[in-house]
Amino acid sequence: MLVHESGELYGRKPKHYSVPVAAMALPEGPDTPWREISTETLTVPEQFYRPSLLVVRMEESDMEPTIRRGAYVGIDRDRKVIRSGALYAIDMPVEGLVIKRILHDTEHTRLILHAENQSHTDQILPAESAGDRVIGRVAWVFQEI
C-alpha cells in the first residue's frame, strides 16, 4: 500500500483559535432554556476547531471517569442526529446543559440519558421531544489524566 501525504502542513506554523467557554448552568432560573454565556476563553489547535464548535467546562461528576469535572468539552452543534451510544449535550429543564450518553429504548419510544458515574441515576426523555433539546454531539475532551 502506498501512502501519500501532501506537504502543505510541513514547515508551517499551525493555527490556533481562541474560543469562548460557556457555562453549563441555567442563566436565570429553572423555567428558562439554557443559553450560551461565556465565562472564559480557551485556545484550541486548528485540528480541533470547527465553525460549529461550542466549548463548555464540565461542572459535574456524573460522566466520570469518561469526562472528569473541570474538563473542557468540545461540542459540534452541527451534529444533532442521535446515534445510540454516543455522547451529547442536552438542554435539560431545571438543570441547564448536561452531557450524557444517549441510548435508544425503542420498545418504550424513549431515550435513556446515561451517566457514566454509577452513583448517578439515568434520566428518561420521550423520543419525540428529545431532538429539540439536543445542543450537539461531543467531538472532543481536554482533561488531565
Image: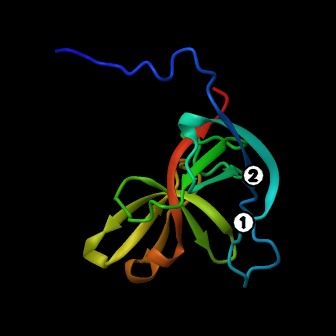
Q: Quadrant of the C terminus?
A: top right
**Is residue 27 visible to us here?**
yes
Q: Amino acid at mark 1?
A: Glu
Frontmost residue, 120 versus 21: 21
**103 relative to 55, above or below:** below
Instruction: Tell me what residue is drawn at x 44 percent, y 65 percent.
Output: 80
Crowding around mark 2 (Cα neighbors within 10 Å: few <14, some 14 to 19, many 20+) is some
Given contact means CB atoms under 8 Å apart, are the residues at marks 2 and 1 in contact? yes
Q: Position of residue 128 (x, y in %)?
A: 39, 82
User: Quarter of the image containing the N terminus?
Assistant: top left
On residue 140, the disc is none
Amino acid type assigned to the residue bearing label 2 in the image: Pro
Q: Which residue is under mark 2?
A: 20
Describe residue 16's horizontal placement relative to residue 118 as left or right: right
- Is 74 positioned to the left or the right of 69 in the image? left
> Relative to residue 106, is residue 45 drawn left or right?
right
